[in-house]
Amino acid sequence: MLRFAAGNLVIATFCGIFAAVYEHFSFGVWSGQMVFSFAPCLTAGMLLVFAALGKRFPGRVCLETLTASAITFAVGMISAGVVEIYGTENDLLNVYPVAGGILLLAAAVTFFLPVRAELERESI
């Protein structure tokens, strides 16, 4: 679980560096979405750290869907930031928050499901 948390924190760092470099070369134009594109991955990583501190260990499906949700939100924010810096709008970018929300809901559902079947499979 801590490997997933570390992976999310690495992705958050990459998003932050990417946003800084992209905005450095955008000639003074910046986007709030681009600036905060690191936040979903950082939040997901911190949720996993807090879950570990609380002695609640989610299953692998929950970890993977939470990571996929954070990455979907981050990619959507970066894409919206690129389009905003370019000076246009695109309605197709609305798919990212919807997909990220569905994945986040799936992660929440799988977090509360028992992981007994997964533990039995690993012990065989």
Image (cartoon, helix red, strand yellow):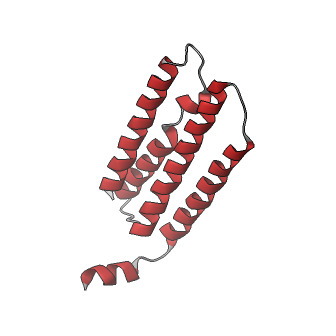
Image-based side of 121 in relation to 12, left or right: left
Q: Which residue is drawn at the image coordinates 45% and 55% (left, top)?
A: 67
Residue in the image at 61% along x and 26% along y: 31
Q: Residue furthest top?
A: 28
Residue 102: percent from left, percent from top: 62, 60
Q: Is residue 8 visible?
A: yes
Q: Position of residue 78 (x, y in %)?
A: 55, 37
Q: Is residue 59 visible?
A: no
Q: In the image shown, does 33 or 120 lie closer to the viewer?
A: 33
Quarter of the figure with residue 116: bottom left
Q: Quadrant of the N terminus?
A: bottom left
Residue 23 in the image: above or below residue 113: above
Nearest the eye: 16 or 95: 95
| Count of labels in the image | 0
In the image, residue 58 lies at what x, y percent? 41, 66
Q: Front-most of 6 and 55?
A: 6
User: Residue at the spot x=33%, y=79% of the render?
Assistant: 119
- Place of residue 2 in the rendered image (x, y in percent of width and height, measured from the top left): 31, 54
In the displayed structure, would residue 68 be above or below residue 109?
above
Q: Residue visible at 73% across and 34% down?
A: 89
Q: Please state, as top left, top right, bottom left or bottom right, where the C terminus lies in the image.
A: bottom left
User: Residue 104's quadrant in the figure?
Assistant: bottom right
Q: Is residue 75 left or right of residue 49?
A: right
Seen in the picture, residue 55 relative to 123 is either above or below; the reply is: above
